[in-house]
Image: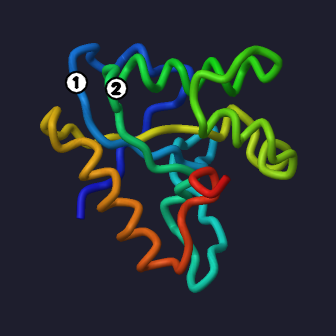
Amino acid sequence: MAKQKFIKLNNVESIPNDIFGVYKLHYVNSKSITALPLTRLFKNDKEGVLYIGSTKTSTLRTRLKRLRYTILNPDKPAQHIAGENYNRVSIIKKKIPFHNLAVSYRITDYNQKMIEEKKEIASYKNEFGEVPPLNSY
């Protein structure tokens, strides 16, 4: 299995601006940019997945910039539900600061992105017994 490639949230401009797909928000070591495990209901999530989403109508870069904006601007209107949930749940924000957040993504066909998102969330739920924490609220 290939090593997971993570992109820190402050580097999402490095993602091409013309792609769509499914992405995950991860808890990572801020120096090595490697996944940190999260305790889940039935087993540890070694990829540290906090959220699974898709690009809906915007490009991947735009969607992730909205996520970053929402996390960094908690007093402004939310542009992304995962960012809103991150800011709402104080224990998550305290234990997993912004510098420990990164994303991974998979390019999908424009018409399949939301179907693929649902499959990813269902697969995660089947493996861990629950959805990622920021998908839950």
Disc 1 residue type (three-letter): Ile
Disc 1 + disc 2, Cβ < 8 Å: yes
> Which circle marks residue 111 in the picture?
none
Q: Secondary structure at mark 1?
A: loop
Task: Kindly identify the residue that appears in the image at 53 percent across and 65 percent down.
Answer: 131
Quadrant occupied by the N terminus: bottom left
**Label 2 environment density (alpha carbons within 10 Å; few <14, some 14–19, many ≥20):** many
Foreground residue among 37 and 24: 24
Quick one: label 1 or label 2, which is nearer the N terminus?
1
Q: Secondary structure at mark 2?
A: helix
Give the quadrant of residue 9: top right
Q: In the figure, 5 relative to 19: above or below?
A: below
How far across and how far down the image is residue 55, in percent? 35, 32
Q: Is residue 85 left or right of residue 32?
A: right
Q: CA distance from mark 1 to mark 2?
A: 6 Å
Task: Kindly identify the residue that appears in the image at 41 percent across and 14 percent down.
Answer: 13
Task: Kindly identify the residue that appears in the image at 29 percent across and 45 percent down.
Answer: 114
Q: Is residue 96 left or right of residue 101?
A: right
Q: Which residue is mark 2?
A: 60
How far across and how far down the image is residue 57, in percent? 32, 24
Give the quadrant of residue 22: top left
How far across and how far down the image is residue 18, in percent? 21, 16
Colour scheme: rainbow
Q: Which residue is mark 1?
A: 19
Disc 2 residue type (three-letter): Leu
